[in-house]
Image (spheres, grey):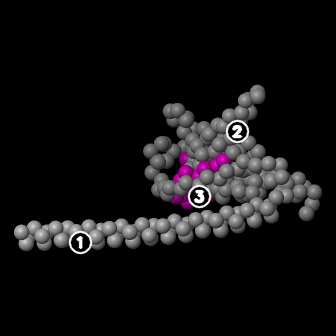
Amino acid sequence: MTSIDTVVKQYRKKNAPVLRPGFVVRVSEKIVEGGKERVQIFEGLVLSVKHGKGMDGMFTVRKIASGRIGVERTFPLHMLFLEKIEVLREEKVRRAKLYFIREQINKKTKKRKTQERNNVFDLTVRDQDDIAGKNSENEQEKDEVSDKSNSEASQENNKETKNDKQQSAKQNVDSNKKQGDATEQGKQE
């Protein structure tokens, strides 16, 4: 591994999403103004993705602002100020670059077929150790432990629901017997 790779590895985001043209995304970007920080959201259609998941990867998002004015922004995929990228839905397109949408009228752009998606990719870096990748083994162990505890909890929930179903079935049978007895007594009188 060269020295350039070690420097670049610090800034590469591990959970960067796979974006494609046609995705409707919501990008949350952290903006620092003076001493204040705020999160600005930009939501729109991905027109193009360039250079994939590499360090020079970029994607262009277009939204229609007030009126008919289109606004486009190009984001570097591994930019430090990107907090998260949410993939809201996926639209069926057959092009690698959707630049033709710039000239289309609003009605034509809305006729595309869509598929709902709710994927959120949190891109925030937790601490400096995570950047250097020092705690990757500890994180894997924690993930394995949490997966085991989650599976055990789901098994317990399944057992509880089975017991609840059995109890409710018994109660239904008992109530049916009581109703049947009451009707028989009414007939005998």
Residue depth check, mark 2 versus mark 3: number of the one nearer the observer: 2
Residue 46 in picture, x, y percent from top left: 61, 50
Residue at 70 percent across and 55 percent down: it is 16
The residue pinned by badge 2 equals 30
> What separation in Å lies between label 2 and label 3 (alpha carbons)?
31 Å
Q: Is residue 23 visible?
A: no
Lower sequence index among marks 2 and 1: 2
Specify the segment rendered in magenta: 84-101
Q: Secondary structure at mark 3?
A: loop
In the image, what residue type sits under mark 3? Arg
Question: Image height check: is 47 above or below 148?
Answer: above
Q: Which mark is residue 95?
A: 3
The residue pinned by badge 1 equals 177
Q: Secondary structure at mark 2?
A: strand
Residue at 85 percent across and 58 percent down: it is 134
Q: Mark 1 near mark 3, Cβ–Cβ under 8 Å?
A: no
In the image, what residue type sits under mark 2? Lys
Residue 100 within the magenta-colored segment of the rendering: yes
Residue 128 in picture, x, y percent from top left: 83, 49
Residue 32 in picture, x, y percent from top left: 74, 33
Judge left or right: residue 84 versus residue 187: right
Q: Secondary structure at mark 1?
A: helix
Question: Image height check: is 70 above or below 161?
Answer: above
> What separation in Å lies between label 2 and label 1 (alpha carbons)?
66 Å
Residue 85 in picture, x, y percent from top left: 64, 49
Lower sequence index among marks 1 and 3: 3
Q: How many marks overall?
A: 3
Q: Which mark is residue 90?
A: none
**Residue that sits furthest to the front in the current view:** 189
Question: In terms of image quadrants, where is residue 12?
Answer: bottom right
Residue at 63 percent across and 45 percent down: it is 27
